Image: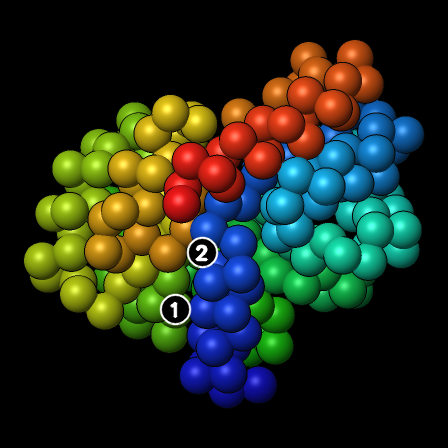
Amino acid sequence: MSTETRAQRLDALLAASPVIPVITVPELAHAVPLARALVAGGITTLEITLRTPVARDAAKAIMAEVPEAVVGLGTVLNPSDLETAHALGARFALSPGATPELLRAAAASDMVFMPGIATPSDLMQVLAAGFTVAKFFPAVPAGGMAALKALGGPFPQARFCPTGGIGEADAKAWLALPNVAAVGGSWLAPEAEIRAGNFAAITERARRTLAALQ
């Protein structure tokens, strides 16, 4: 698949969902109810992080039982993780950073991929590999909105999905930046609520977040 086609598919995903929940699934039984709760709240693009032993099975279960959800795998750290995302049928993959090895594998794959950056040097490597949309992580510790505004000067072709330290109260301000395509965050599905099975609260927060962006 060409770089242009991959970019178009990613653009379509981000246009459909400007807010992407970063989800860490503690137990497999939580996966489907959580996805249904977010979809009921209007958020359909989901990042399932590869941070727990059940993450792969959780993503598989959501794709099988919640067809409205657009499932991607996050915390992709190496080519093996990228291949896992492809084999599972994930619609996209994201990484908190970008090694040369991972960038080469992603460039050779037809997987829609968003590499992570935190510095101008990171971004230069990502752009050289053919990726113009990057996850800015950890967004707040790495300089926040001021950093993304500064990156817009020398890198006008780059767009970002900032993640890390963003919450419900400031998501709209981040999205107002001209080089921000979407925002990601774990505030939409707190682990305590997932473990407690408080999925109604997650649905309500998703609805409230989207309403605030109007």
**Are the two marked residues, 2 and 1, in contact with CB atoms closer than 8 angstroms?**
yes
Q: Position of residue 189 (x, y in %)?
A: 63, 27
Q: Nearer the viewer, residue 39 or 107?
A: 39
Q: Nearer the viewer, residue 13 or 109?
A: 13
Q: How many marks?
A: 2
Instruction: Please tell me which residue is depicted at 73% across the width and 53% down the height of the picture.
Output: 69
Q: Position of residue 130 (x, y in %)?
A: 37, 74
Q: Secondary structure at mark 2?
A: loop
Q: Amino acid at mark 2?
A: Pro
Q: Amino acid at mark 1?
A: Phe
Q: Secondary structure at mark 1?
A: loop
Q: Earlier in the sequence, mark 2 or mark 1?
A: 2
Which disc, if any, is residue 115?
Answer: 2
Residue 77 in sight here: no
Q: Going by the image, does 80 lie left or right of 104?
A: right
Q: Going by the image, does 124 lie left or right of 203?
A: left
Instruction: Please tell me which residue is depicted at 68% across the width and 57% down the height of the picture.
Output: 70
Which disc, if any, is residue 131?
Answer: 1
Q: Going by the image, does 6 lie left or right of 111?
A: left
The quarter in which the N terminus is drawn is bottom right
Q: Going by the image, does 43 lie left or right of 140?
A: right
Crowd around label 2: few <14 · some 14–19 · many ≥20 (10 Å): many
Q: Position of residue 212 (x, y in %)?
A: 42, 35
